[in-house]
Amino acid sequence: MERHFSRQHLHELVWSEPRAALAKRLGISDTGLAKVCIRAGIPMPPRGYWARLAAGKPVDKADLPRRGLGQSDLIQIGRPNLGTSTGSEPEEVPPEPRFEETLETVRARAQAMLLGCRVPKGLQNAHPLIAALIAEDDARRRETEKNRFSWQQPRFDSRIGQRRLRIANALFTVMAHAGSTASLSSRELDRIGFRIGDTFIEVEITGSQAKRRVGKRDSETPNDSIALKTAPWPRLTGAPEAWSDTASRPLETRIAEIACDLLVTGELAYRESVRKHHEWCKERRQKWEADIHEARERMEREARERRQRQETEQREWLLGQAANCRHADDIRALVRTADRRHLDSTEGAAQGVYGRWRSWALMQADRLDPCLGALDALVGPPVEELSKPDSAG
C-alpha cells in the first residue's frame, strides 16, 4: 500500500526504532528503506547505535540536513493504490506550501555546489555520454572512409557540431560535480536533460550557421551561433530561460553561470510543481464537496417530489373511493325505488328477470362500496408501495 511521509517525519521514524522493525511495519525490506533514506538525504543511525542506547551509553542523533535543490520533501513508500476508486473521498488538502529560502539564498547554495569544479575546455577525458557520441562518430567516420556513399555520416564533424560536443561535455561535467545526473534526449544533441534532485529539466540546443564580414575587406568567415533554452517548463520568475552566444562572451565561457542557473531552475521548477499539486488537491477537494452537496440537494428534491406524488396518488385514491361509495348508494337507492314499483308485479316472467337483475345490481353495489371490504382496501396502498415504481425506474 502506498504511504507518504515528509522528510522530517521519516527522519523521526528512522531514529525512533531499529530500521529492520520500522521496515517491517511499513511493509518494505530493510534494504529498501535504506535506499529510500539515501535518496531522500536522510541520515540513519550507525551500526551499534541501538545497542549503545539500550546500554544507557550516550548517543548522538544526526540532524536532518536541509532539502537539496529540486529535491522533493514528500517521500513515497510502497506501490501506488491503483485500485482506489476515483469517486472515493479525496485526501485532505495539504497545507499551503511555504519555502523559507529566498531566491538569493538558493542561488548562493547553487554557487557553493559548484565551488572547486574545473570546467573542461576540450574533449579529453570526456563525460561518458559524450565519449559514447564521439565513439559513434569515429565508427561512422571509418564506415564513410570505406564507403563514401554510406548514409551514416558523422554527426559532429562540422565546427558547430564540435561546439555542441564541447558545450554539452562541459555542462555534463560541471552538473555532475553538483550531484546532477545528465541524460541525452537526442543523439544529435538537440536536447539534453538534467535531474536536479527529483526534478527533471530539459535543455534544447539550437544552432545556426551564418557568415559575417571581417575587417575592411569584404572577406567572410563562418559564424556558428549556439543557443540553449530550457523546455518545456512554463515561465519561472527568477530563473533564466535561455542563453546564447554574444560577440564578447561565447557560451563556452559561461558554463559555470549556466550550470548555476540550471540548479536554480530545478529548485524553482520543484516549487512550482508543489504549488500546482496543492492547487490540484484543493480543486479536487472542492469539486468533491460540490458533488456531495449537489447529490444531497438532488436526493432531497427527489424525496420532496416523491412525497408530493404520493400525496397526489393517495388523494386520487380517496376521491375514487368516495365516488365508488356514492355509486354504491345510488345503485341501492335505485333498487329500493324499483322494489316499490315492480316488486308486486303479478307477471311471473317479469318477476324472474327483475329478481336476477336486482341480485346483480346489489352485488355490484357491494363490490363498489369501499366500506364493506377490508380496511386496507378502504385506506389504499401504503406509501412505500407507491414509491416502488419510482425507485425501480
Image (spheres, helix red, strand yellow):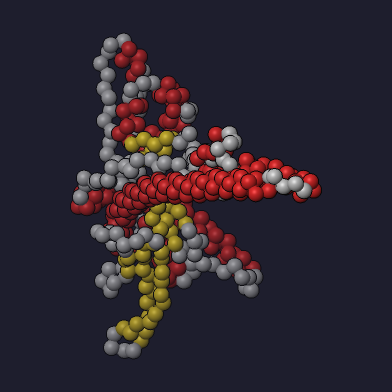
* Residue under the point 32% across and 65% down: 242
- Vertical comparison of 247 with 378: above or below: below
Residue 392 seen in the figure? no
Determine the residue positioned at 25% across, 16% down: 58
Can residue 28 be seen here? The reply is yes
| Residue occupying the far top of the picture | 55
Q: Where is residue 305 in the image (x, y as percent from the top left)?
A: 44, 50
Residue 336 on image: x %, y %: 61, 45
At x 38%, y 40%, the residue is: 91
Residue plotted at (28% across, 11% down): 56
Q: Quadrant of residue 192?
A: bottom left
Percent x, y of residue 75: 38, 38
Please state which of residues 202 and 46 is positioned toward the viewer in this rendering: 202
Q: How many marks?
A: 0
Of all residues shown, which one is farthest toward the right?
349
Depth check: 173 or 70 in front? Answer: 70
Return the residue nearer the eye: 127 or 242: 242
Give the x, y percent position of residue 304: 42, 47
Position of residue 315 relative to residue 65, above or below, is below
Please state which of residues 231 and 52 is positioned toward the viewer in this rendering: 231
